[in-house]
Amino acid sequence: MKPRKSTQYFSFKFHFLHRQEGSFTLEATMVFPLVLLISFLVLFISLFLWRTAQLELRAETAAERAAYNWDNSYRDPVSGAFAVSNRDGLYWRTSLTELSSLFRISGRSSSTLNVPASGTESLSLSQSKLINQIDIVPPDSQGTFLYKNSLLERSVQVDLDRKSGIPRLFARLIPEQSAAGIAESYITEPAEFLRNLDLLTDYAGRLYEYLSKRDEVASLESFSEDKPPPYIDSAAKASRYIQELVNGKPQAFPTSTVGKERQYDAIDPDGIAHDAKYTVNKKDALDQIKKDVELIKSGKVKGVVWHFFQLKKGSKPIDLTPALRAELEKNGIVVVIHHL
């Protein structure tokens, strides 16, 4: 009988091991902690990425708004609107902070504002423009606002940093990470650029015109005849003498200021107009001066020279009065006196 009982006991035991009841509960108990841990990790990673993206967006927005509103610290941080009476002054670009940043006077190439800002009493002009965007920074963040200025470009760089926010319960399992957001925006002032470009082109043209006239006047003033002119007793002789002297030919140019055209006795190979004056009528002279100015400004002639002759040695040139000479020189017309 005893062996029979033993056989029934072992048969019941092996039958219990092969039963399927409760297997799902057992497997779930073993797998659920792992699934829960993975779910929390995915949640924390997603939260970390979201906080990083949010910080990047805040940094980019702050940099763009600061760069856009840089020409006036009184602008609204969001819309850029400002009252007409609220300005930084006409010459704020020549302020000490701008010049020291540009020419490295202070030893630094930028202006820096730490976030969160400790005080606003002793801020420079650049820092006061940066602090206008500090409200967009999340309260639990820290970092720097950086204004960089060089000869060719200016920019605002925002560097923000904040903790990932992992609960203390999981701090031992997951190392602490910091979410960072860095953005840089370049300062562009289209209106100021156009004003500077217009100023540059205007003064470059004036400088070129001044240097051209100075060279022409210098070459004409250095002009000297190899021998005294022959006795001139008519306008025709004066005209022929000038043509031979400068190796030029007579030419007429149409004008719109006064009359229909301006006739010159000779145009030399360099494009300078020469006019021989044997006798001068005051009204005609003033009209001719206006025509000369028009042709010089239009570039049809590079310069104008009026030649005056003496009737006899030691006498004054014909009809060259001090008033006429002053009018000619005021309009850039060169006067050459031919002495006997």
Image (spheres, rainbow, N blue to C red):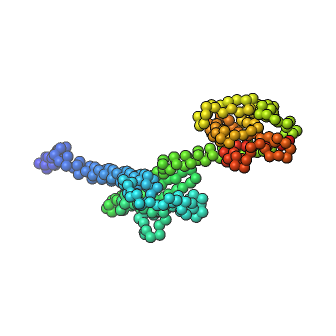
Tell me the residue at 25%/50% (across/down).
32
Tell me the residue at 41%/53% (across/down).
65
Could you tell me residue 219's position as x and y percent? 77, 42
Tell me the residue at 35%/62% (across/down).
139
Which of 97 and 51 lies nearest the eye of the viewer? 97
Could you tell me residue 241's position as x and y percent? 81, 33
Which of 83 and 270 lies nearest the eye of the viewer? 270
Query: 249 left or right of 94?
Result: right
Residue that sits furthest to the left in the current view:
1
Q: Which image quarter holds the C terminus?
A: top right
Could you tell me residue 282's position as x and y percent? 68, 42
Tell me the residue at 57%/57% (across/down).
102
Identify whether 149 is placed above or below 292: below
Could you tell me residue 40's position as x and y percent? 30, 53
Identify whether 299 is placed above or below 80: above
Residue that sits furthest to the right in the current view:
227
**Quarter of the image holding residue 94?**
bottom right
Viewer can see residue 328: yes
Which of 127 and 60 lies nearest the eye of the viewer? 127
Viewer can see residue 10: no
Q: Total of numbered circles in the picture?
A: 0
**Quarter of the image holding residue 308?**
top right
